[in-house]
Image (cartoon, coloured by chain):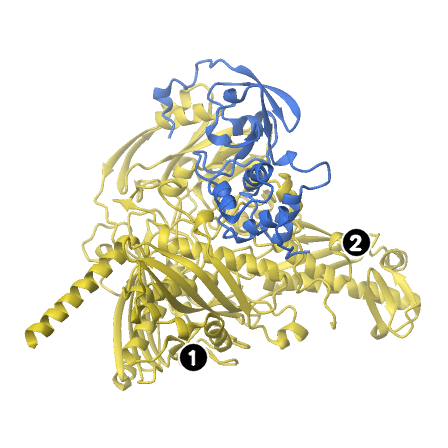
Chain colours: A blue, B yellow
């Protein structure tokens, strides 16, 4: 737990904000953030994209995963100022207008979503995987998604969705 | 209905597109201008008298807008159970003393998080430490530190009894006397958290005469009732708004203090207040599931027929009653259903300790008691030389059997479940194989079976669901339902039912849900009855709208109602399909000729229509449900005898969940329960010492990751009768299936290693210890043999 009294982050003092430029889903945003502001806070609160979820806020569950320069990053333990000038992709950037990505479609087809709270992070981790490995093995899928907790599905449907999206013979189970 | 187009088919989730694009709005996504940050001051002690609270320094801090203690509340108590026997027992903030670490003492609202945290630190509380007690067996002893006085109606000379469930039928003593074999065992389960990804979060905004609340919950109407009562407002002054919910598993039902505090702080400040629980708070101060200690004595005939059973269950309910008095009732219920027990004596105690309060947790007593009963049944079978399948078939309920409480199991598919599970898994060929002839290497495989049954949609406030189907004048429909989608898929299932009954497309159905002002009352997503209760209300409502359309068409077309049918938004004559009226035309005609009637359908449903109330928690008297689901589950595990580590390799679930409205959603429930159960068995434990949580995060509390996935296969034994005649004869599927599989894993570990574990979790340490003990016993036996020779 943050010890406010000792951290110097307390009240009454004016913490200097810094301007940070983030290219989020193709659009540049300039946001003023205090040094302690995390990337997930900048994305959700300053930029207003709430698709990225805050869950454990300690880097243990993967719900906040976004792509920074194409690599999955835990946005709850990444400072916004570290990402100045970088490209950030969130779940809102996956679809091409109304057209969902093959992975998003596969999540719908396989029943890979229940409560949906892990879904944005899961989709981002899996998207990064498919971009570097278009036909991943089961081991690669497990490795890529090992940091994303899902309490609802037991992961089986999520693995099937990644296999379906990478055209590895898994057929939709829902219509 | 001859042909089904929507019901019984695996339609994609209605909420799916919003959930894969980030558009789905959860409570943390709702933003209101001027929102203050709320924070709770929690007790650092397990048991202490509050001598003095001084909030003046906190109130004086710039940026702090309000600080509340119990003196700023109306002092109205709440409880998970609120009945004459078990009245509300908990204040929204601690008064005079705290009874567990993390108990809420005060709350602040400030302009930002840092100020709120600072303000909490500036609240001065003087405590006088009281002796604390953590083990329920110690807490029960007369003279133990008193958390609360024992329940006045419990006659036993025990301390700290929050409640007792007690029931008996037949003649247990005679039953044991008539038994060929009697066995007694003791089992224990452990503390686990629910593990919902979305933290507890509440946003409240008082608008002078209206309390608007967004909160992560399992039922809007329960929250409204409890919030309104504790705030002393009429129900109409509290509105719970719809948000999607990021997982619950039982942990978001009851009223939580932070929900009240957000609302009260908003009333005082006139600004919106948001309180988010940190994961550390959830782990160390919020409600987890319920560890039970279970003593079971069972008498059987030589052929394995159960003659008598005596069960004593002790629950560690924490600092208040919570759902502790419910779990001791439910443990009886989950004992009673699957097998015939001619003579039974049951007593369950709910014991106060200085732990945080307990909540329901997926299965609510079933995983614990089924683990115990099914483990013992396997031991009895082995002692008698009967196989695990035969002993279960010998005792399993048959279709149409009456239960001791007067309920009927109707088309219970348990016998079919057991047979199919045995056959599909090759159970009898695999069982005992590695114990009989251990293979090379350190890996041993084992197989085990467990059986369970679960009730659906019992009578708990608000007891019934209503649904409204409003026709749009283009023939599409808006469905108003209080049902809350916590991930189980209620919006999808209700849409399928409405589409089916109205003969319109899935895309023609728009769901408005879970808003206490705009949608009708609903039972909520926490008593395993939403598809059955709300689903049938939706069927009625859609059918009601359809009947109105047909009646208008009958007048317009001059065709009797009995000769009209509907398809693709058209009413047509079954004799002459060219005589037809589109829904658009029918609605226009209804407005024109029926004094403006725009065609609105109403439906409502309640289980146990002849019963006034839920059965007595104390005596179990009264009927419970007409809706019992059954299952048999087989686990195949691998154990490394060098390290003691065990894992679930494959699970097979054979179930009778009634008619599956959406088979893929049913499958999703099964897979999720297998995963949760394997965490229960092998991975998860909230570690505590003196009431403090030692592992309050997901690094030290290990939930299953993708590496712990097991193969999850399933099959149903749904009869043709369900398929053709009763597409709405749905039963439970969302929580009972964490139970049989847990027992199956325990039995499979034994099958692999010969190590019998009477307590969860089945850790490497316990298994290794068991293996060493076996080795020691064998050595001793061979030494004795040598000596004897």
Q: Nearer the viewer, residue B769 or B392?
A: B769
**Marked residue nearer the N-terminal end (2 or 1):** 1
Q: Which mark is residue B476?
A: 2
Residue displayed at 49% across by 52% down: A154
Question: At numbered mark 1, what does the secondary structure look like: helix, strand or loop?
Answer: helix
Q: Position of residue B138 (x, y in %)?
A: 21, 55
Q: Is residue B303 left or right of residue B423?
A: left
Q: Position of residue B404 (x, y in %)?
A: 43, 78
Tell me the CA gap for discs 2 and 1.
Answer: 50 Å
Q: Position of residue B307 (x, y in %)?
A: 33, 82
Question: CB under 8 Å between callouts 2 and 1?
Answer: no
Quadrant showing the N terminus of chain A: top left
Residue B64 visible to the viewer: yes
Q: Subunit of mark 2?
A: B
> Which quadrant of the figure has residue B599?
bottom right
Quadrant showing the C terminus of chain A: bottom right
Vertical comparison of B725 with B69: above or below: below
Tell me, yes or no, whether dots 2 and 1 are on the same chain. yes
Q: Which residue is mark 1?
A: B393
Of circles 2 and 1, the one toward us is 1
Q: Is residue A99 left or right of residue B59?
A: right
Residue B198 visible to the viewer: no
Question: At numbered mark 2, what does the secondary structure look like: helix, strand or loop?
Answer: loop
Vertical comparison of B56 with B706: above or below: above
């Amino acid at each position: 737990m943050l010890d406010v009294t000792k951290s110097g982050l307390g009240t009454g003092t004016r913490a200097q904000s810094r301007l940070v430029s983030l290219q989020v889903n193709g659009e540049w945003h300039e946001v003023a953030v205090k040094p302690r502001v995390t990337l997930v806070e900048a994305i959700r609160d300053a930029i207003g994209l709430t698709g990225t979820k805050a869950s454990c806020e300690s880097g243990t569950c993967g719900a906040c995963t976004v792509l920074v320069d194409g690599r999955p990053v835990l946005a709850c333990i990444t400072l916004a100022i570290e990402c100045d000038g970088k490209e950030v992709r969130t779940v809102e950037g996956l679809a091409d207008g109304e057209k969902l990505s093959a992975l998003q479609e596969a999540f719908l087809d396989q029943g890979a979503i229940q409560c949906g709270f892990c879904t944005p992070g899961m989709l981002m981790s899996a998207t990064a995987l498919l971009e570097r490995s278009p036909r991943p093995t089961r081991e690669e899928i497990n490795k890529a998604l090992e940091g994303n907790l899902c309490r609802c599905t037991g992961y089986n449907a999520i693995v099937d969705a990644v296999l379906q999206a990478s055209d590895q013979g898994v057929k939709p189970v829902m219509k | 209905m001859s042909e089904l187009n929507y019901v019984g088919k695996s339609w994609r989730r209605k909420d799916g597109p919003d959930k894969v694009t980030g558009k789905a709005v959860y409570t943390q996504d709702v933003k209101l201008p001027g929102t203050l940050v709320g924070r709770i001051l929690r007790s650092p002690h397990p048991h202490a008298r509050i001598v003095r609270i001084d909030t003046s320094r906190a109130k004086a801090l710039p940026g702090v807008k309000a600080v509340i203690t119990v003196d700023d509340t109306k002092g109205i108590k709440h409880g998970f159970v609120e009945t004459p026997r078990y009245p509300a027992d908990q204040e929204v903030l601690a008064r005079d003393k705290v009874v567990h670490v993390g108990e809420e003492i005060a709350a602040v609202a400030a302009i930002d998080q840092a100020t709120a945290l600072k303000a909490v630190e500036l609240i001065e509380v003087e405590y006088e430490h009281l002796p604390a007690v953590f083990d329920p067996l110690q807490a029960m002893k007369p003279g133990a530190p008193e958390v609360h006085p024992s329940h006045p109606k419990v006659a036993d000379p025990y301390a700290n009894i929050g409640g007792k469930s007690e029931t008996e039928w037949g003649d247990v003593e005679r039953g044991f006397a008539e038994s060929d074999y009697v066995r007694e065992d003791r089992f224990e389960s452990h503390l686990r958290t629910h593990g919902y990804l979305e933290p507890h979060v509440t946003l409240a905004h008082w608008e002078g005469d209206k309390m608007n609340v967004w909160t992560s919950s399992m039922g809007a109407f329960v929250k409204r009732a409890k919030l309104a009562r504790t705030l002393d407002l009429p129900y109409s002054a509290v509105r719970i708004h719809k948000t999607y919910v990021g997982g619950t598993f039982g942990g978001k039902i009851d009223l939580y203090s932070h929900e009240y505090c957000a609302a009260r702080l908003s009333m005082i400040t006139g600004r919106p207040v948001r309180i988010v629980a940190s994961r550390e708070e959830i782990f160390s101060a919020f409600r987890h599931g319920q560890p039970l200690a279970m003593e079971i004595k069972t008498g059987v005939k030589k052929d394995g027929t159960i003659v008598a059973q005596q069960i004593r269950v002790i629950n560690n309910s924490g600092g208040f009653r919570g759902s502790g008095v419910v779990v001791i009732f439910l443990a009886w219920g989950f004992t009673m259903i699957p097998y015939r027990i001619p003579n039974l004596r049951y007593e369950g105690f709910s014991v106060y300790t200085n732990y945080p309060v307990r909540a329901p947790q997926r299965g609510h007593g079933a995983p614990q008691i089924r683990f115990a009963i099914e483990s013992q049944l396997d031991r009895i079978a082995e002692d008698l030389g009967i196989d695990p399948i035969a002993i279960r078939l010998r005792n399993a309920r048959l279709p149409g059997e009456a239960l001791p409480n007067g309920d009927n199991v109707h088309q219970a598919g348990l016998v079919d479940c057991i047979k199919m599970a045995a056959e599909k898994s090759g159970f009898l060929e695999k069982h005992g194989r590695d114990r009989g002839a251990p293979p090379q290497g350190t890996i041993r495989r084992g197989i085990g079976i467990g059986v369970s049954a679960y009730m659906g949609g019992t009578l708990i406030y608000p007891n019934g669901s209503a649904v409204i189907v409003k026709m749009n004048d283009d023939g599409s429909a808006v469905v108003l339902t209080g049902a809350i989608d916590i991930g189980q898929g209620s919006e999808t299932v209700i849409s399928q039912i409405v589409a089916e009954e109205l003969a319109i497309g899935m895309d023609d159905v728009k769901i408005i849900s879970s808003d206490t002002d705009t949608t009708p009352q609903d039972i909520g997503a926490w008593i395993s009855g939403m598809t059955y209760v709300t689903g049938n209300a939706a069927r009625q409502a859609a059918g009601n709208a359809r009947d109105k359309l047909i009646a208008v068409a009958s007048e317009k077309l001059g065709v009797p109602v009995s000769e009209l049918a509907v398809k693709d938004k058209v009413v047509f004559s079954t004799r002459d399909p060219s005589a037809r009226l589109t829904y658009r035309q029918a609605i226009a005609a209804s407005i024109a000729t029926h004094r403006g009637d725009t065609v609105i359908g109403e439906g409502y449903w309640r289980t146990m229509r002849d019963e006034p109330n839920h059965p007595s928690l104390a005596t179990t008297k009264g009927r419970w449900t007409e809706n019992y689901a059954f299952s048999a589950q087989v686990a195949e595990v691998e154990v490394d005898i060098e390290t003691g580590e065990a894992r679930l390799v494959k699970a097979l679930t054979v179930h009778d969940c009634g008619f599956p409205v959406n088979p893929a959603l049913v499958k999703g429930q099964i897979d999720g329960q297998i995963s949760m159960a394997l965490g229960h068995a092998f991975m998860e434990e909230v570690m505590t010492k003196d009431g403090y949580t030692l592992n309050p995060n997901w690094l030290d509390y290990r939930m299953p990751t993708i590496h712990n996935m097991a193969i999850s296969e399933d099959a149903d034994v749904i009869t043709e009768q369900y398929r053709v005649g009763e597409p709405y004869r749905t039963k439970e599927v969302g929580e009972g299936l964490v139970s049989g599989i847990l027992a199956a894993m325990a039995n499979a570990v034994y099958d692999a290693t010969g190590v019998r574990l009477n307590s969860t979790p089945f850790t490497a340490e316990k298994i290794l210890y068991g293996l060493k003990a076996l080795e020691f016993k064998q050595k001793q036996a061979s030494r004795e043999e040598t000596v004897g020779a």
